[in-house]
Image (cartoon, rainbow, N blue to C red):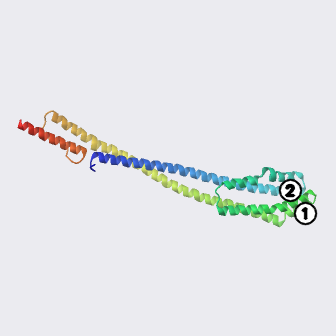
């Protein structure tokens, strides 16, 4: 196929347009996928933070119940402690939820440290409960209001804050990277869309100048020849394009007809 022919140029423009549509479609799908990814990351951040706070609040509920029971000896607080520990199990629920999320090894190291500290409070709490049940609230208070207990609970709060901050920082970096990628994809999508518009304009212009106008001229030339105007000059130039070859064929036909007429 000759490169300057109308069919070659038209196929080239159409091919470029199809490529532009394919690229635009891929960019649109990537943009949608990135948006879904950002939503999932945001959901993971919210869910992880919620589980960590649930674990913290459950620990505080246990601490409040055992400290109040140690100070007052009221069975109400003993029941609250046991209910949270054996029925509600908010800490276990929060931990199971965290295990389903994609936490990093360093984040799990902090969580395991928090769990170890929480487990370390259990013997002190059990001793305080035992003493409070016998009415020895003063000694019971020494276990759950002592320096070791207070230091451990404070350390648990600090580590929980650190874990939340570390997870949020990581997730924010992921969201930032996804957002940058999405902006790049959107730029490519807009570029492919603008390029497609340019190709459509090119097709319209090509159809008018390279196809429609030459065909109209050829039709006019054929009408003149059919009416016997063999001495009229052709307005189309002969070249390697389809219309140019058609013009050459008309010129040759005209020459041959004129030659036959002269011979007759």
Residue at the location (33% across, 46% down)? Answer: 11
Which of label 1 and label 2 is nearer to you?
Answer: 1
Question: Circle 2: is it few (<14), some (14-19), or many (20+) Cα within 10 Å?
Answer: some
Q: Secondary structure at mark 2?
A: helix
In-front residue for pair 53/125: 125
Above or below — where is 124 with respect to 247?
Answer: below
Residue 186 lies, in percent from the top left, at 48, 52
| Residue identified by numbered label 2 | 68
Pointer 1 residue: 139
In the displayed image of the protein, which residue is found farthest to the bottom? 147
Give me the disc on residue 115.
none
* Coordinates of residue 130 in the picture (x, y in percent): 89, 59
Residue extending furthest top?
Answer: 227
Packing grade of label 1 (10 A; few <14, some 14-19, many >=20) is some
Residue placed at 74% from the left, 57% from the top?
56
In this rendering, position of residue 18 left or right of residue 163: left
Instruction: Measuring from the top left, give residue 3's x and y in whole percent.
Output: 28, 50
Left or right of 180: which side holds 68? right
Label 1: state its secondary structure: helix
In the picture as drawn, the residue positioned furthest to the front comes out as 1
Q: Nearer the viewer, residue 231 or 130?
A: 130
User: Is 34 situated above or below 157?
Assistant: above
């Amino acid at each position: 196929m000759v490169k300057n022919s109308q069919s070659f140029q038209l196929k080239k423009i159409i091919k470029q347009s199809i490529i532009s549509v394919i690229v635009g479609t891929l960019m649109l799908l990537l943009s949608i996928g990135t948006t879904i990814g950002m939503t999932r990351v945001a959901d993971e951040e919210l869910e992880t933070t919620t589980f960590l706070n649930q674990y913290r609040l459950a620990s505080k509920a246990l601490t409040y119940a055992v400290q109040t029971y140690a100070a007052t000896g009221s069975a109400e607080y003993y029941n609250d402690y046991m209910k949270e520990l054996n029925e509600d199990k908010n800490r276990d629920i929060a931990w199971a939820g965290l295990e389903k999320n994609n936490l990093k090894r360093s984040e799990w190291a902090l969580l395991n440290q928090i769990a170890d500290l929480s487990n370390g409070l259990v013997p002190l709490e059990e001793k305080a409960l035992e003493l409070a049940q016998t009415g020895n609230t003063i000694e019971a208070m020494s276990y759950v209001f002592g320096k070791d207990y207070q230091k451990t609970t404070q350390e648990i709060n600090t580590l929980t804050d650190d874990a939340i901050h570390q997870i949020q920082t990581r997730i924010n970096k992921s969201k930032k990277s996804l957002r940058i990628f999405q902006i790049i994809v959107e730029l490519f999508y807009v570029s492919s869309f603008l390029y497609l518009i340019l190709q459509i304009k090119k097709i319209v212009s090509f159809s008018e100048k390279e196809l429609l106008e030459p065909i109209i001229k050829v039709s006019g030339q054929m009408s003149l020849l059919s009416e016997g105007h063999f001495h009229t000059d052709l307005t189309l130039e002969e070249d390697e394009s389809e219309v140019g070859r058609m013009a050459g064929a008309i010129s040759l036909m005209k020459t041959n007809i004129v030659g036959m007429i002269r011979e007759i």
